[in-house]
Amino acid sequence: PPSIASQLISSDIIKKISITGSSRVGKLILKQAADKVQRVTMELSGHSPFIVFDDADINKATDIAVTAKFRNNGQVCISPNRFYIQEKKKDDFINSFISKAKKLKIGNGMDKNVQLGPLTTEKRLNEVEQLVETTKKEGAKILMGGKRPAGFNKGYFYEPTVFDNVKDDFTIMREEPFGPLCPMLSFKTFDEVIKRANNHELGLCSYVCTNSMEKAHLASEQLETGSVAVNTGVVAIAEAPFGGIKQSGYGREGGSNAIKDYLNVKYTHLGIKG
């Protein structure tokens, strides 16, 4: 709550602030921290592109996409939110993705047979529903899901939802869904998809599926995100620096970079007597 955060931030006892949260809340805390030139590490919102080139293994790519997207039911800052599939493989990818997503069991997350739990709050559920309605009104076609699952009278559950006919200027391509929503788009060339993926104010994470080392390296260099996952959905690990650029924040968690964010560098220049 703001009352607690404000008291902590203004206290001289506090020497460092680290936040994992939305860009909106990050900016509010940053303004308060500025009054005492407080040091901060900010890991904020994400809107990760998931790029699949036509030389990728589609079966593996959809395994990665389904696992990464539906972890915590899409409520993860590095959840893939914009799927760009090279034209020749778009239909294959979507068909495989939907086939695997339909096998996910919705229910109590404490049940070992369940892969898809609820959204965190009623507010989140309402916002996901509103974004689905907005996406439909803007012209998208629902290929799967798009509603609360039948048979759940309580709990904030929502079905995995896949959209087609999505354009880059749709609301869902700008706002972080933070839920199980998957807009599918196609692209023609490498340069085109990199430009479209980078055309966003957030830059936390991105995903690339390809069997070309050249494309993997070039994409990693050119994508404007703090992390790039190539042919894997596992990107946040304790020994590696994790964090974003642009309005996804600054500073790093994990690895030696994170330790340095909590240290002060002191330089002593010692003159020798005589």
Image (cartoon, rainbow, N blue to C red):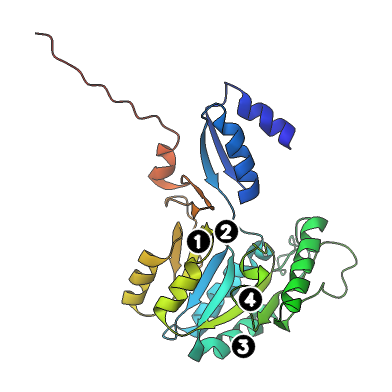
Residue 95, label in figure: 3
Residue toward you, 65 or 47: 47
Q: Are marks 3 and 1 in contact (CB under 8 Å)?
A: no
Looking at the image, tell me whether mark 3 or mark 1 is earlier in sequence order: 3
**Label 4: which residue?**
183
Classify residue 61 as left or right of residue 260: right
Q: CA distance from mark 3 to mark 1?
A: 25 Å
> What crowding class fits label 3: few (fewer than 14 Cα within 10 Å), some (14-19), or many (20 or more)?
few
Vertical placement of residue 29 versus 36, above or below: below
Classify residue 140 as left or right of residue 192: right
Task: Name the amino acid, label 3.
Answer: Asn
Looking at the image, tell me whether mark 1 or mark 4 is earlier in sequence order: 4
**Label 2: which residue?**
46
Vertical placement of residue 227 versus 64, above or below: above
**Label 1: which residue?**
205
Secondary element at image label 2: loop
Task: Name the amino acid, label 4.
Answer: Pro
